[in-house]
Structure formats: structure tokens, C-alpha cells
């Protein structure tokens, strides 16, 4: 299993990957999240990011909010984010387990949790923790992979002995195990949100991964995937898209 520091380095690499499809999958998700934050962050308000990873969203949140708290159970992620405090003075770093959070109840206008719950075995407890932290009228912005997307299924094969060496030669950049222990279908994710006390206001899917075409199709393969993604999003194929997104309010 990759260490937190290795995963941070990987996350930073993905947004400028030499593989067009790999870069698009991650940048499209980043862009949707940023647009959602711009729509829903409260000027002068207090925002929390649960699991900041490489910290790509923290400067955005800081520019949209009065104060930003980055919370993680892993100290390595907080140490990486600490360098941002030189340019982001309204950033606070807190070591905290969202499944048993010690942060004050009803203390945030917005909670961001992107690509985190799939790493938490008890995602229901994590969602209850996030609901507890939101002020009345507060907003949760969340994303997580879809359980049966081709990318997640291919990842299980990619790390089989003997296969991963070939995959790394093809990509010629870091390819690390994801650590996903709790992949959910959209139905399961939506049920857990409702049971935690959220009402879903917006939802979206993105990220069509086509095996082999992604690795060898270059820019042409990417353009085909982008065209097919639009069609998949309108029908039953939306369950094949890699990422599911939600904007939800506490009820």
C-alpha cells in the first residue's frame, strides 16, 4: 500500500499527466468541484475540507470563505498542506477523524469531501459526522467513484502480480494502488446521504474510461471518450462513469 506522501505526490502528478485521458478524468472532476464551490460557498463563511489530499481545493476555498479548516486523520496530509499557510493565512489545519469528530457541532457553512469516503469503511459514520458539523442551511459538496465504473474494475486487474509492471511502462509515470475499500453505487451513496440527514440538491456523473483506448488512443481516444460520455450520462450508461458528485443540504 502506498504511503500518504506517495499518494500526495501522485495526486499532484495526475492533473498534469502525460496521458490525455488520465489528465482529463482528474481535471474534469477538479473543475466540477471548483464550480460547485463557487456556486455554494458563503462569502465570509466558515468552510471545512475533510481529507484535503494534495490541497488543490484549499486555496479556492480560502478565496471564497472567511476561514478554512482542513481536517485529516493522517498527519502526512496536514504536513503537506502546512506549506500553503504562507499564502493562505485563513487556513487552519486540524487532525481529526470525521467518523468520531471532535470539531464543534454546527460550526461550518460548507463541508467539502471529495474522493475520501471510498477510503473509509464506515462511510455512514463519516456522513453523520459531516452533517453534525454543518450549520443550519449549510452545504455539503461530495464526490466519490462509482463502484462498477470500468476504471475501478480495471484498477483491480492492473495491480495483479506481473500486470502492474506493464501498466507502469505504458503510462511512464506513477501508478499506485488507490486504497479504495468502500466503493459504492449511486443508489447506496444516495441512501447513505439521506440516512445521515441530507437532502440532495444537485447530482452529476463524469469520467468515461475506455480500457486500451485510454492507454493507446492519445488525443483521438480522448475525444471519442468525451463524446460517448455525454451520451452515457443521459441513459443507463451513467453508472459506468467514474465519478459521482453531490451537493446536499442538511434537513
Image (cartoon, grey):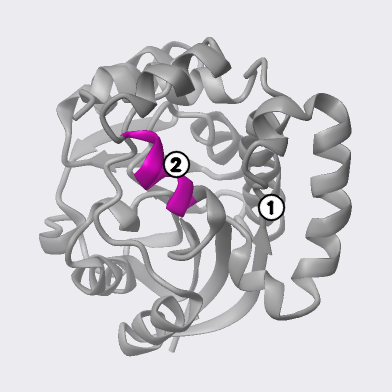
Q: Tell me residue 85's x, y (percent).
A: 40, 18
Q: Is residue 88 visible?
A: no
Q: Tell me residue 71's x, y (percent).
A: 27, 42
Q: Tell me residue 190's x, y (percent).
A: 45, 81
Q: Tell me residue 33's x, y (percent).
A: 62, 50
- Which of the pair 220/102 is nearer the observer? 220
Circle 1 SS class: loop
- Which of the pair 54/151 is nearer the observer? 151
Callout in the foreground (2, 1): 1
Residue drawn at (35%, 50%), measured in percent from left and top?
A: 116
Q: Label the magenta part by its dominant secondary structure.
A: helix
- The stretch of residues the image draws in magenta is 152-159
Residue bearing mark 1 = 208
Check whether the beta carbons of the residues at disc 2 and disc 1 lie within 8 A of each other. Answer: no
Q: Residues within 10 Å of mark 1 (few under 14, many from 20)?
A: many
- Which of the pair 46/189 is nearer the observer? 189
Residue drawn at (85%, 27%), measured in percent from left and top?
A: 219
- Which of the pair 168/16 is nearer the observer? 168
Spot the residue most to the front.
162
**Quarter of image, res 93:** top left
User: What is the C-alpha distance between the residues marked 2 and 1?
Assistant: 35 Å
Residue bearing mark 2 = 67
Circle 2 SS class: strand
Q: Is residue 131 visible?
A: yes
Q: Is residue 36 magenta?
A: no
Residue drawn at (78%, 30%), measured in percent from left and top?
A: 217
Residue 4's tag is: none
Badge 2 or badge 1: first in the primary sequence: 2
Q: Residues within 10 Å of mark 2 (few under 14, many from 20)?
A: many
Quarter of the picture containing the C terminus is bottom left
Q: Is residue 29 above or below residue 15?
A: below
Q: Is residue 131 left or right of residue 233?
A: left
Amino acid at each position: 500500500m502506498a504511503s500518504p506522501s506517495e499518494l500526495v505526490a501522485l495526486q499532484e502528478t495526475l492533473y498534469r499527466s502525460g496521458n490525455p485521458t488520465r489528465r482529463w478524468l482528474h481535471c474534469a472532476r477538479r473543475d466540477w468541484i471548483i464550480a460547485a464551490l463557487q456556486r455554494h460557498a458563503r462569502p465570509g463563511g466558515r468552510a471545512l475540507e475533510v481529507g484535503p489530499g494534495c490541497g488543490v481545493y484549499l486555496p479556492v476555498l480560502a478565496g471564497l470563505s472567511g476561514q478554512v479548516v482542513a481536517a485529516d486523520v493522517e498527519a502526512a496530509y496536514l504536513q503537506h498542506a502546512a506549506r500553503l499557510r504562507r499564502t493562505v493565512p485563513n487556513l487552519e489545519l486540524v487532525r481529526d477523524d470525521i467518523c468520531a469528530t471532535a470539531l464543534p457541532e454546527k460550526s461550518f457553512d460548507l463541508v467539502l469531501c471529495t474522493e475520501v469516503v471510498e477510503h473509509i469503511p464506515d462511510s455512514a459514520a463519516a456522513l453523520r459526522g459531516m452533517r453534525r458539523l454543518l450549520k443550519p442551511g449549510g452545504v455539503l459538496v461530495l464526490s466519490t467513484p462509482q463502484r462498477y465504473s470500468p476504471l475501478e474494475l480495471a484498477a483491480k486487474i492492473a495491480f495483479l502480480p506481473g500486470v502492474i509492471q506493464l501498466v507502469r511502462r505504458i503510462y511512464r509515470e506513477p501508478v499506485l494502488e488507490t486504497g479504495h475499500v468502500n466503493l459504492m453505487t449511486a443508489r447506496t451513496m444516495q441512501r447513505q446521504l439521506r440516512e445521515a440527514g441530507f437532502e440532495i440538491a444537485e447530482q452529476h456523473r463524469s469520467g468515461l474510461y475506455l480500457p486500451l483506448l485510454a492507454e493507446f488512443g492519445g488525443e483521438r481516444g480522448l475525444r471519442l471518450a468525451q463524446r460517448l460520455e455525454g451520451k452515457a450520462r443521459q441513459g443507463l450508461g451513467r453508472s459506468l462513469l467514474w465519478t459521482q458528485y453531490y451537493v446536499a443540504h442538511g434537513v
